[in-house]
Image: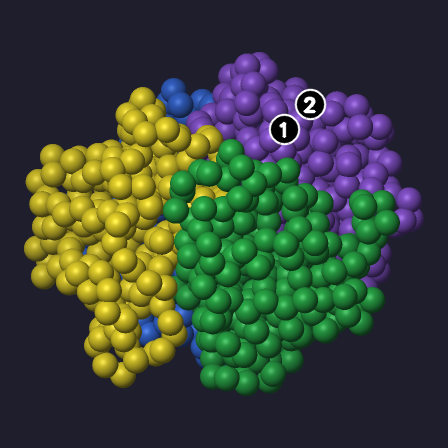
Chain colours: A yellow, B blue, C purple, D green
């Protein structure tokens, strides 16, 4: 069971990368294998709406997204994290999401895979929940199974308050919700695993 | 595998009841057993925030919700439908949701159960998606697995445009999304079934 | 310029009542008159979908909502607060909202009035933003002008973390956002005031 | 009174451009001057989170966004439209939004300006309302006044169903909501106009 984690931050190794990796650590503790992708430093252009992927199983844009498609196919569960920019996900993450239309149009390849979301913001209620909602909407478009952060709180997903590098490590409550997302995605992937494949 | 359907309309036998039952029909075609509850005519008071259910596994209010708790416990999947009132779910449905806190506080009894949502509105974009989002937020609070309407469209859930009694039957596209929700909830419940119990 | 504040908590005088009143205090500092309604203790039944208000400017249900309609008509701005129940607004507040359809159907009497939202939850990210979104959706249905909490943070609205009675008073950051909502609603009401009437 | 319209579609002159321009046409009928920007063909990179704009009133990225900032400053109202991609706004539009942080950090220059949203999707309930919600969240972050589509429907904003070029012109109901957004933004801008400046 492979759980893929994707961070939509333009800052390599910063708080969102840290949080997604923290969730993956918990997924590993549940017996999953994990892989991590930071969009920082990658070149993933927005979808140009050429619609070629409606006809052939291929994207007309040749960039780093080409390395991500196979991982989306292969994973059994997905964790997506974003810093909150202007009360929402980053444009970088949305570019990834829009380009992932290939997966949907060519056999709904993300179907039935559990997905959980993580958001990191400078302020407590500056868009954390709304960013998670946006990620969930995409997951439903991909026919995935959306999970939250599970007990003991069980809300929308992982929500961390952090701004300067390293601050995420100090948000204990937030990190518990982040780990909850890792646990939920790994658990559901495992429950579905044998039957689904 | 029992799939429970709940309609939050105050109108007995009207469009929302019809749509939830239509989704249950599809669930049965997938091999599930089903049960249907219309909140219309039932007496389900809002939560009074007495917090007794934090201490004992019981609600201090004695009304028709007492008949619904055992079905929530028993079901393996849940379909919730609401007419759209003022760009959101009905107060009647929210009363049910708020009272369901008992399930969460006493062992997260809805955990891992797939849930899907249906909304019915007089107008195409008068709050259908937002109502579904509200139902999903509650499902995540209950630690459920949220599913959409699945292929071929795969969006948020079942969305039907209907106002006068019987109009739902004429919304072919909408009914396809409704049936998609029934199919998704039943499929995921079955996939999880053997392992989960 | 009259600013009306409505609290959707079933707990009289508790944290949500306090927060809405705190926002009204700021509105008064901006020169507005204010009025406060706590739904706690009031009897406001859910809308029964009788649709009589489509024909005559009257609701078929005779309860405390009858005292609220004139205040909705009279106010120049509105502040609505809710505790967060199951990641959303309370059923009690939604009953008020659904019944307010009378205002919409009889001349859009809330048109152009600024509205802001406040949410109070036991936990930092347990639905505060989503509850505010739900209140905003209703405000747009009423053709109101939606405002947030304004500078210095400027996000969705007032978000306070409090559970036990009195805890709201200790959430300094949250109370700043609450006061921001009061300031915004009063300011915009005043800006529109002279011209609009 | 200048109303600015921004289309976030990568397709120049297609349905979303058409709809935003249709809203601007209505704004002109209300006496406003208008300006239209299509992001199609423009080069607006995502925010790189360099945070230079926290220190000086300038963005470190030199691209077409430089031509948009002065229009944001100058306009008295804003209409933002997006095609729906994967149940949300486009990455192209989000790049514009993220870069607009300059306006917020340097004096909240969008404060008190009315804003309305338009979404265009291939399917009736494939994310139109959610896309509008996302645009609204950004507007509140900018301390703007959010308006819907106003009477006679008064919901979240302009919602058009169209896929192939030209199809938007055939969605009469949708275009009414689009025109409603134009009317609302222009009306509120005019009401505020004299006082605000």
Q: Residue at x 66, y 51 (%)?
A: D73
* On screen, residue B188 above or below A148: below
State how far apart marks 2 and 1 are (Cα): 7 Å
* On screen, residue B131 above or below C68: below
Q: Residue at x 45, y 22 (%)?
A: B52
Q: Nearer the viewer, residue D112 or A126?
A: D112
Q: Nearer the viewer, residue C102 or D46?
A: D46
Q: Position of residue A80 (x, y in %)?
A: 29, 48
Q: Position of residue D161 (x, y in %)?
A: 53, 75
User: In the rendered structure, which disc, 2 or 1, sits on the residue that comes first in sequence?
Assistant: 2
Label 2: chain letter:
C
Q: Position of residue C191 (x, y in %)?
A: 82, 42
Q: Residue at x 65, y 21 (%)?
A: C18
- The answer to whether the residues at label 2 and label 1 have Cβ atoms under 8 Å apart is yes
Label 1: chain letter:
C
| Residue assigned mark 1 | C178
Tell me if I can see residue B59 in this picture: no
| Residue assigned mark 2 | C22
Using residue A172 as the reference point, say whether residue B128 is left or right of it.
Answer: right
């Amino acid at each position: 069971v492979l759980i893929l984690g994707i961070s939509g931050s333009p800052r390599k190794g910063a708080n969102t990368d840290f949080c997604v990796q923290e969730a993956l650590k918990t997924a590993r503790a549940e017996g999953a294998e994990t892989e991590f992708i930071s969009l920082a430093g990658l070149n993933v252009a927005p979808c140009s709406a050429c619609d070629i992927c409606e006809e052939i199983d291929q994207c007309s844009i040749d960039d780093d997204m080409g390395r991500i498609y196979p991982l989306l196919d292969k994973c059994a569960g997905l964790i997506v994290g974003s810093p909150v920019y202007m009360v929402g996900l980053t444009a970088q993450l949305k570019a990834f999401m829009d380009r992932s239309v290939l997966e949907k149009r060519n056999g709904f390849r993300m179907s039935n895979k559990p997905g959980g979301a993580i958001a990191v913001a400078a302020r407590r209620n500056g868009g954390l929940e709304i960013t998670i909602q946006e990620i969930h909407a995409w997951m439903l478009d991909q026919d995935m199974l959306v999970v939250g952060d599970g007990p003991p709180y069980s809300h929308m997903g992982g929500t961390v308050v952090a701004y300067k590098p390293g601050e995420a490590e100090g948000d204990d409550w937030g990190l518990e919700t982040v780990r909850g997302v890792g646990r939920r995605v790994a658990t559901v992937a495992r429950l579905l695993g044998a039957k689904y494949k």
